[in-house]
Amino acid sequence: MESNFFLVLLLLVLGLALPLLIFLMRTISNILPYLYATARIRAKEARLLKAEVLEEMINTGSLAEIASLLENTEYALAMQGLVLENAEAIEQLLERQTADIYSEVSAMMPEKVQGVFAFLRQQWDVRNLKTLLRGLRSGLPSEKIMAAVLPFGTLDVELLRKMAEAAGIEDVLPLFETTPYPELAQMLPVYEQAESLLPLESMLDKVLLENMWRQVEAGEALQVLQPFFAARIDVLNMKLLMRAKRDHLLLSDVQLYVISGGHVSQRLIKAFDEVDDVSALASELEGTLYYKPVMDALADYDRHGSLFALEKVLDETALAIGRDTAVKQPYGLAPVLGFLARKDVEVRNIRAISRAKEAGLAPEHIRELVLNV
């Protein structure tokens, strides 16, 4: 009788423990494929430029000194053969090194998530298309435009070359009909009216991020990336709406470029035509992570009438959201996206410092351009 009791007790304990064991086994099986990649990502994060190196760059006297500092960092190999004519030379070097990093990180990841990196490569398509549009608008020869194009995206290189050989913006836009961005093929009147590439670049961002958002929402493997992309969408929308409010536009004037998705910007969209100015629009962010940093930056806007400080804190808050997501999800895709985001910020900061140094700005002004996360 006693043995039967212990047998029943044992079966009961096993029955209760079985779901926990299954959960643990599934968790371990999900983590194991990422252990090697995560360890390498952590090592790469440790080699990102420290704040003191950026400060040295800010205080240097020339671009040559910035290049010299980069020779003692992870950029050393990429620096070989650099012909330092201007800040653009450093920018191209940084872009190519970043593309190599994306490719290297992609190769680290398990086979089952390789599709995710094809998804991320779409961002490079947009970078390349913007490079093409800017080169054509500036009247650059096709060879120079293609030299700045990075063959890391998903678009066919021959199509990009055909675009680079177009006579101008009016001739290249019809070629977008065969790309994932066909909306641009119909935007020649908008471009001609604006006399600016901003509407075309805004539409590229819109199509890219709406497509990415749909994939993040639909794909279970991509759900962990939702905070990253929600923040990117929200920040672009908030910048657009604040600029429009500053310029006394209606929502209907910019509705074409508002990106669907995200978590926060919808409340600004709903309130846009009901509020009178940027400060009132910013107050609609109350209860979100963006509220305090934006309200703190409003004083600078009130003094100077420039949205720079507001846009900077929006960028920094979005990056902080990405960082916190990576910390909460220490294995899998989140740390990878966290590292790549920090890498992009590093490149952005070096580019900003190089451009400002070339323009002769004082260190105290250059320091204001650097994103801090």
Image (cartoon, rainbow, N blue to C red):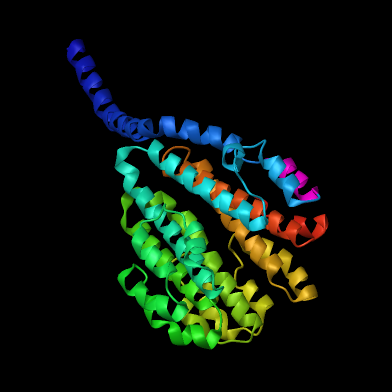
Query: How many labels were placed on the picture?
Result: 0
Q: Residue at x 80, y 74 (%)?
A: 303
What secondary structure is the magenta-colored segment mainly?
A: helix
**Measured along the vertical axis of the image, is residue 6 above or below residue 352?**
above
Q: Residue at x 55, y 85 (%)?
A: 194
**Measured along the vertical axis of the image, is residue 166 above or below residue 79?**
below
Q: Quadrant of the N terminus?
A: top left
**Measured along the vertical axis of the image, is residue 196 above or below residue 149?**
below
Asked whether residue 155 is in view, the answer is no
Query: Where is residue 298 shown, x and y percent of the image?
Result: 73, 70
Seen from the viewer's position, the closer of residues 55 and 329 is 55
Tell me where residue 105 sits by quadrant: top left
Seen from the viewer's position, the closer of residues 319 and 329 is 319
Seen from the viewer's position, the closer of residues 211 and 1 is 211
Query: Where is residue 274 shown, x and y percent of the image?
Result: 58, 85
Query: Where is residue 138 shown, x and y percent of the image?
Result: 56, 73
Tell me where residue 295 sits by quadrant: bottom right
**Measured along the vertical axis of the image, is residue 187 above or below residue 143?**
below
Residue 59 magenta-drawn?
Answer: yes
Residue 238 magenta-drawn?
Answer: no
Q: Which residues are magenta?
A: 50-60
